[in-house]
Amino acid sequence: MNTRKQYVRPMDGWWLKNPFYVRYMIRESTSVFVGIYAFVLLAGLLSLASGEAAYNDWMAAMTNPLVILFHVVALAAAIYHAITWFAVAPKVMPPLLTGKKRVSDKTITIFHYVIAIVLYLVMLGIAWKV
Amino acid sequence: MMAKRSNEPIFWSLFGAGGVIVAFILPVIIFITGLAVPLGMLPPEVMAYDRIHAFAANWIGKLFILVVISLTLWHAMHRIFLSLHDLGINWGRTFFRWLCYGIALLGTLTPLFLLIRI
């Protein structure tokens, strides 16, 4: 039996050694903030279902400076996610052809940005139209 | 005998669908609910109780709210589960799998239940 203590290369902080991995970890960490935000929305839905008083309490809680700070970070996380999502979109979808020519990765990414900005403006417009 | 099929594609599909929602919808929703209305950039009527209640009473509104909360959580929890390995947490795979996907499932059934009743 082998009783020697096997050497295992330490992996702590492996992702700090290369900017590519740092960006990867930032991308993965966006999920924590958008996940928490989903629970903020769920809390809002719970209060909405409980009646007007509970809903107004939730609305008041949303103005807390720490909650505002969280939403600044969550917004940044969602936008960072969107940028990375659109960047890999052409790599994960089947090739798109116009005639016999393949649509370039850049065109597909730009197309995603255009759709996203149009959608953002439409949603803002719907929300604003009180 | 058919070989046991992996359930991975289901979770990756939910992750992908959620990723689309987070990229195309969430930035604006976070901006409106978390910053614009609380800070007064948009009038408070935008998120008035009657208006949001009417939105949640409509089936399009119900579907929108359910999709945003549920798919965002399936996306986030799948990513968090896979990131545990990157952080060197290699123990308790089964436990964390149940925990992560359990939270996402709860984040689907709770709004579904609430929205049906509104």
Image: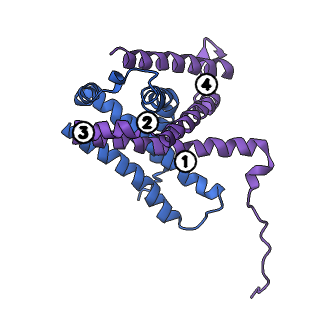
Chain colours: A purple, B blue
Q: Which mark is residue B63?
A: none
**In the rendered view of the protein, which quadrant contains the N terminus of chain A?**
bottom right
What amino acid is at disc 1? Arg
Residue drawn at x 77%, y 70% as measured from the top left: A8
Amino acid identity at mark 2: Thr
Which residue appears farthest toward the top when viewing the image? Answer: A99
Q: Are marks 4 and 1 in contact (CB under 8 Å)?
A: no
Alpha carbon separation for disc pair 3 and 2: 16 Å
Residue kind at label 3, given as amino acid type: Ala
> Which mark is drawn over residue B79?
1
Disc 2 and disc 4 on one polypeptide chain: yes
What residue is disc 2 on? A63
Residue A44 location, quadrant: top left
Report the residue at 66% width, 46% height from top: A25
| Residue placed most toward the observer, B24 or B4 | B24
Please state the chain letter of the residue tagged with numbered disc 3 in the rendered image: A
Assess whether mark 1 and mark 3 are in contact (beta carbons under 8 angstroms): no
Check disc 4 and give the amino acid type.
Answer: Pro
Q: For the point 45% across and 52% down, which residue is it? A: B7
Residue denoted by label 4 = A95
Q: Nearer the viewer, mark 2 or mark 4?
A: 2
Residue A75 drawn above or below residue B43: below
SS for dot 3: helix
Q: Nearer the viewer, mark 3 or mark 1?
A: 3
- In space, the residues marked 4 and 3 are separated at their CA atoms by 52 Å
Looking at the image, can residue B115 be seen?
no
Q: Are marks 3 and 2 on the same chain?
A: yes
The answer to which image quadrant residue A13 occupies is: bottom right
C-alpha separation, residue under disc 4 versus residue under disc 1: 26 Å
Q: Give neighbour class at mark 1: few <14, some 14-19, many 20+ (Cα, 10 Å).
A: many
Mark 3 lies on residue? A53
